[in-house]
Image (cartoon, rainbow, N blue to C red):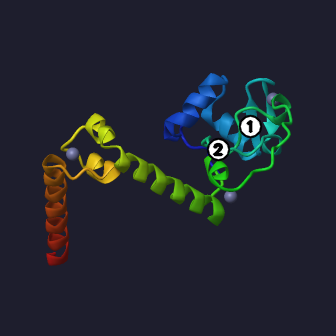
Amino acid sequence: MTAPETAEYPAGIRAAATRLGLTPAAYMTKKDAGLKWCRACKEWRPLAEYKPSTSTDDGVRPLCTRHYKPRQATPITHGLNGYQRGCRCSECRAAHAREQVRIRAERRADPARADRAGHGKRATYNNYGCRCPECKAVHSQHMRAYRLRNQRGLAT
Ligand SMILES: [Zn+2]
Ligand SMILES: [Zn+2]
Ligand SMILES: [Zn+2]
């Protein structure tokens, strides 16, 4: 296997390699060996020593486990709370849906909120249930455009 030219590496890889004073090829060799640079340790550590993460590109936390105090995981309570903590089980989803309905009903019960949101907007029509002429006009215009788009879609 021949190492590709430096320019062939994605910019992200090249930048990461430069930061560590490595060539992209040397950087990739480390990565291919299942290693990841820990900024805090200032050394290459096996990927297994990084906790998984959903918010980073490589799917693990930026620092190795040494830098994270083991936190007592509080057991998740399902329902709205669980949904806010990222749980998407049927119970949490149902609670979230109920909450959305409640929020919408609350907004509709208070027309002043629609005034604050501003009229002549689809969001005001949808979220605040406003049926003033301005909001209705915007909504029907949207529906017309939507129907037209659909018809064109069918025709082609
Ligand atoms: Zn570390
Ligand atoms: Zn849940
Ligand atoms: Zn309105």
**As rendered, which of 151 and 50 lies closer to the eye?**
151
Q: Look at the image and tell me in which quarter the C terminus lies.
A: bottom left
**As rendered, which of 21 and 116 lies closer to the eye?**
116
Crowd around label 2: few <14 · some 14–19 · many ≥20 (10 Å): few
Q: For the point 74% across and 52% down, which residue is it?
A: 77
Height in image: 94 above or below 67?
below
Q: Tell whether 97 sits left or right of 109.
A: right
Q: Which mark is residue 58?
A: 2
**As rendered, which of 40 and 33 lies closer to the eye?**
40
Q: Which mark is residue 36?
A: 1
Height in image: 2 above or below 140?
above
Q: Residue furthest front?
A: 109
The amino acid pointed to by label 2 is Asp
Residue 102 visible? yes
Image quarter for ligand 2? bottom right
**As rendered, which of 29 and 153 lies closer to the eye?**
153
